[in-house]
């Protein structure tokens, strides 16, 4: 059901209920008014009888008492009867002001500037005496009744508005309650959890939003899967190219450099008596040895020791990381102190994941050496069997990552490898200074 239809139906139902209550209350009020009018008519009849009795022999003071009794009764709601003698003196009691409990200033406003004429009737008694009966209009009860009716209508209207507002708030709260699930679903999508789905909603508009978000999550899941597969292929291509390049360097340059070393060693023996030639031969031997050493280091980076098998064999990731740390520490131009801690608990890792972890550690160590000005770096690799998760943590004591510097290609490559292996990457500050890189991977 549409949200607008739902709200209109609920508001219409509440409005009809309030109108029914107002109608019933109006009927009860009308019954009371009719009863008051009937009683007032009866009192007027008694008044007419009392006025007719003025022509009998009863003393005037008794007639005045009868009229006072009628005046004291509230049923003569619209006028007050006064009895005057020949000299105009009042024989009956003067009307007392009726106190109003609800809003006296409103009564004064209603009765202000009101022209109230007085009707007088002269009667001759049997003894020839003339008396005057004066009808003094009394609009106070009518005013009080009108104000009370207006107040009742105002309270009914206020109650209707309050109930409608409450019903609207309740309906909106109930109708928009699925928004919490939708917002939670958006938060999960924002956090990268595209597998969760939002349940169907009773409200059509919200259900359309939920279904659109579900389709979006499904599309993102499909795209992420394609992206991971593409990254896997790219990394496989990179590793294959590195492997081929390592083979070429080893087979071509390695053999030729080794042959140059042999030739230079032979020349050294043959030119032992000729210092100039011996010096050239020694230079050839030293240069070829230096180039061969750099070539071995380059080959180790292109195809690390321990990561040269396939997925059917055990992957010696720990040995490869130890060799990486040893190579970094053996460089004379760097005073970086490297520490490696591994706790894999004998877990055999897939080739792709092992290569990715090695490359991430390699790139992180390179970034530390180039940019951090650190003197100490620690690499921790641990497997959590309870959660089935592999954690790689690289921490240095350098200057950290400045906020105004955008990440370079090295960090982008790390992110790609983490994404390709369904991992999570977190960068944070180390204590007291430096940077911490943590990459977590699920191990199936």
Image: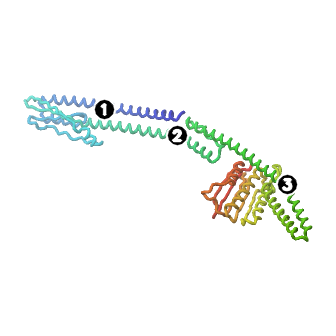
289 vs 431, nearest the viewer: 289
Determine contact: label 2, label 3, CB under 8 Å: no
Residue 392 vs 52, above or below: the answer is below
Q: Which residue does the image show at 57% across and 44% down from the upper left?
A: 183
Circle 1 is placed at which residue position?
A: 33
Q: CA distance from mark 3 to mark 1?
A: 119 Å
User: Which SS class for mark 1?
Assistant: helix
Residue 426 placement: quadrant: bottom right
Q: Give the residue at mark 3.
A: 252
Q: Residues within 10 Å of mark 3 (few under 14, many from 20)?
A: few
- In the rendering, at what x and y percent does residue 207 appear? 58, 37
Tell me residue 305's x, y (percent): 81, 57
Of labels 3 and 1, earlier in sequence is 1
Q: Is residue 105 left or right of residue 264?
A: left
Looking at the picture, how far across and down is residue 161, in whole percent? 41, 38
Task: Note whether residue 309 is visible.
Answer: yes
Residue ID at (73%, 65%)? 334
In this rendering, position of residue 293 left or right of residue 442: right
Disc 2 versus disc 3: nearer the observer: 3
Q: Secondary structure at mark 3?
A: helix
Please tell me in which quadrant of the rendered image residue 427 appears.
bottom right
Mark-to-mark CA distance, 1 and 2: 43 Å
**Mark 2 neighbour density, 10 Å: few (under 14) some (14–19) many (20 or more):** few
Residues under numbered marks 3 and 1 in contact, where contact means CB atoms less than 8 Å apart: no
Task: Say what secondary structure mark 2 lies in.
Answer: helix
**Above/below status of 101 relative to 118:** below
Camera sees residue 66? no
The numbered mark, 1 or 2, whose residue comes first in the sequence reads 1
- Residue lying at 81% horizontally and 49% vertically, measured from the top left: 311
- Precedes in sequence: disc 2 or disc 3: 2
Residue beneath disc 2: 174
């Amino acid at each position: 059901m549409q949200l607008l239809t739902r709200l209109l139906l609920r508001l219409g139902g509440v409005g009809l209920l309030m109108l029914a209550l107002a109608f019933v209350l109006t009927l009860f009020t009308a019954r009371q008014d009719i009863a008051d009018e009937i009683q007032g008519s009866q009192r007027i009849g008694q008044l007419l009888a009392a006025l007719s009795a003025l022509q009998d022999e009863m003393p005037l003071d008794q007639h005045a008492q009868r009229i006072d009794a009628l005046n004291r009764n509230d049923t003569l709601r619209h006028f007050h009867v006064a009895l005057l003698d020949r000299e105009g003196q009042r024989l009956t009691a003067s009307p007392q002001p009726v106190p109003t409990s609800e809003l006296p200033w409103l009564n004064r406003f209603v009765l202000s500037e009101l022209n109230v004429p007085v009707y007088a009737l002269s009667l001759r008694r049997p003894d020839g005496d003339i008396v005057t009966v004066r009808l003094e209009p009394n609009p106070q009860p009518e005013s009080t009744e009108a104000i009370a009716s207006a107040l009742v209508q105002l309270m009914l209207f206020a109650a209707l508005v309050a109930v409608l507002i409450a019903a609207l708030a309740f309906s909106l709260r109930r109708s928009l309650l699925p928004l919490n699930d939708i917002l939670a679903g958006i938060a999960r999508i924002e956090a990268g959890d595209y597998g969760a789905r939002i349940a169907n909603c009773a409200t059509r508009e919200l259900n359309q939003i939920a279904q659109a978000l579900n389709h979006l999550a499904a599309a993102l899941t499909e795209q992420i899967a394609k992206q991971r597969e593409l990254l896997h292929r790219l990394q496989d291509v990179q590793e294959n190219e590195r492997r081929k390049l390592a083979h070429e360097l080893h087979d071509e340059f390695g053999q030729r450099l080794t042959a140059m070393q042999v030739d230079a060693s032979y020349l050294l023996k043959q030119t032992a008596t000729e210092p100039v030639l011996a010096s050239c031969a020694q230079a050839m031997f030293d240069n070829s040895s230096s180039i061969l050493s750099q070539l071995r280091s380059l080959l180790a980076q292109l195809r690390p020791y321990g990561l040269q098998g396939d997925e059917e064999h055990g992957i010696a990731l720990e040995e490869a990381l130890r060799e990486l740390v040893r190579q970094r520490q053996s460089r004379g131009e760097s005073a970086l102190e490297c520490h490696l801690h591994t706790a894999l608990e004998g877990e055999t890792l897939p080739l792709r994941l092992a290569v990715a972890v090695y490359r991430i550690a390699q790139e992180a160590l390179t970034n530390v050496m180039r940019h951090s000005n650190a003197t100490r770096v620690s690499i921790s690799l641990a497997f959590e069997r309870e959660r089935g998760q592999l954690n790689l943590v690289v921490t240095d004591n350098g200057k950290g990552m400045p906020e105004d510097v955008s990440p370079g290609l090295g960090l982008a490559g790390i992110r790609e490898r983490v994404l390709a292996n369904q991992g999570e990457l977190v960068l944070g500050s180390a204590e007291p200074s430096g940077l911490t890189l943590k990459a977590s991977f699920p191990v199936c």
